[in-house]
Image: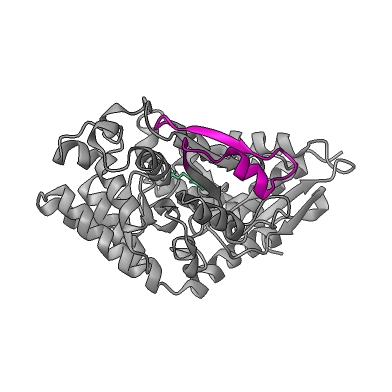
Amino acid sequence: MRNKGLEIIQGFILMEMNNEWGKIYKDLGAKPVINATGSVTLLGGSTPVKEVREAMELGDSSYVVLADLEKYAGRRIADLLSVPAAYITSGAGSALTLASAAFMTGHKDENIEKLPNTDGMPNEILIQKRQRYWYDRCMEFSGARLIDVGDEYKTSVSDFEKLISEKTAAIHYPVYEQNPTDENVLSLEIVIDIAKKHDIPLSVDSAGQIYPLENLGKYVRMGADFQCVAAKYMGAPHSTGFALGTEDIISKIAKNSFIGYETNRIRGIGRPHKIDRQEIIGVVTAVERWMTLNHEERLSSFEYMTNKIIKGINNKNGINTQKIDNIMGHQPFGLLVDIDQNISMINNEILVEKLKDESPSIWTRINEGDSKICIHVFGLEKGQEEIVSETINRIMKQNLR
Ligand SMILES: *Cc1c(COP(=O)(O)O)cnc(C)c1O
């Protein structure tokens, strides 16, 4: 029998000997971690791919008029994704803030300069109460007010129509196509109809809808005025994203942006949402790569790593694994882990903490509203999947009843 324990130690020693791993962080006193959670901001979100890093380095070679660069980069992305217009931002969260500002200010310079004071502007963004989510806060930074539509159980068309007024700036709709459909929220199609009927802009958070490829721009093609995308999920820097939309909304976003502030001398709220010229090049390169990438290969490597962790975990130690069979969105595959406390003295929460305390530290998490540990392979380097399963085995073995 192969000595797995020895192998893992050898693997770990190799990683440590190649003491580049995390050294730059260790030198500062910060602890490098193995990211088995996925693309989470908490741990740094993403690692730009080689093509992106190389293109970004070429961006150093000269300065450029940023307003022009944004215009041409936006045009390239819009063409690639078959939408009228696009604008690169410092993350999808920034796109949400800037779009919220744009819905309220229109093209009016004096309004742009007034935010987050919204006097005299429509400032209400409607969202179904059941759809309230972590990132809706990004919309409020503009000064907009989020207004709940319906209750925690369901929403009707008349719930929307009761709240629509001259104060309504937009309707917002987050999409998570990888999740089971919630029958108790109004569908995007119905909400688009409401927005069109009342001539209200529709905003879609599609930050994670990067696969299937048709979802990039699909919501705008369906009739939304704006959708955001997080480029952190596509091999671009963690700090980047983009807005897709109509010419009208994208031009208003540009005016509210940090470049609008500097180029047009309009002091809008976008000034702190700064992005490098190298990052703009990085996003264009990431989108070009993404649209020509062999996604079957990408998905099969995610599945391979997932299977390897599942096979590597010894379920005799009181631990059950369940493969996540999803290829949509930003985190394909992965697994759920659940401890049988008849066999083990520890529970899921304790295992998460023990994994963090290991050396190297391994980060996993229990998603909100769930009880099982969720492991994603998005942030794992080749070989780290074995460290994950072997470390779990060792901890479990030490804690048998
Ligand atoms: C990550 C994410 C955001 C925020 O995107 P950033 O690029 O990190 O600002 C917004 N909405 C959803 C659904 C996301 O997954």
* Residue 8 seen anywhere in this rendered image of the structure: yes
Q: Nearer the viewer, residue 155 or 378?
A: 155
- Looking at the rendered image, the quarter that the N terminus falls into is bottom right
Where's the C terminus, which quadrant? top right
Q: Is residue 361 visible?
A: no
Residue at image x 55%, y 59%? 329
> Would you place residue 119 above or below residue 399 in this image?
above
Residue 255, x across and y down, in percent: 25, 43
Taking the magenta stretch, the answer to whether it contains residue 216 is no
The structure residue drawn at horizontal position 62% and vertical position 59%, both measured from the top left corner, is 178
Q: Is residue 331 left or right of residue 258?
A: right
Q: What residue span does the magenta drawing correspond to? A: 141-169
Q: Nearer the viewer, residue 235 or 398?
A: 235
Q: Residue at x 55, y 49 (%)?
A: 174
Image position, residue 268 (x, y; %): 26, 33
**Which residue extends farthest right?**
342
Q: Position of residue 225 (x, y in %)?
A: 42, 55
- Magenta span contains residue 150: yes
The x and y percentages for residue 162 are: 62, 40
Name above or below for residue 358 compared with residue 205: above
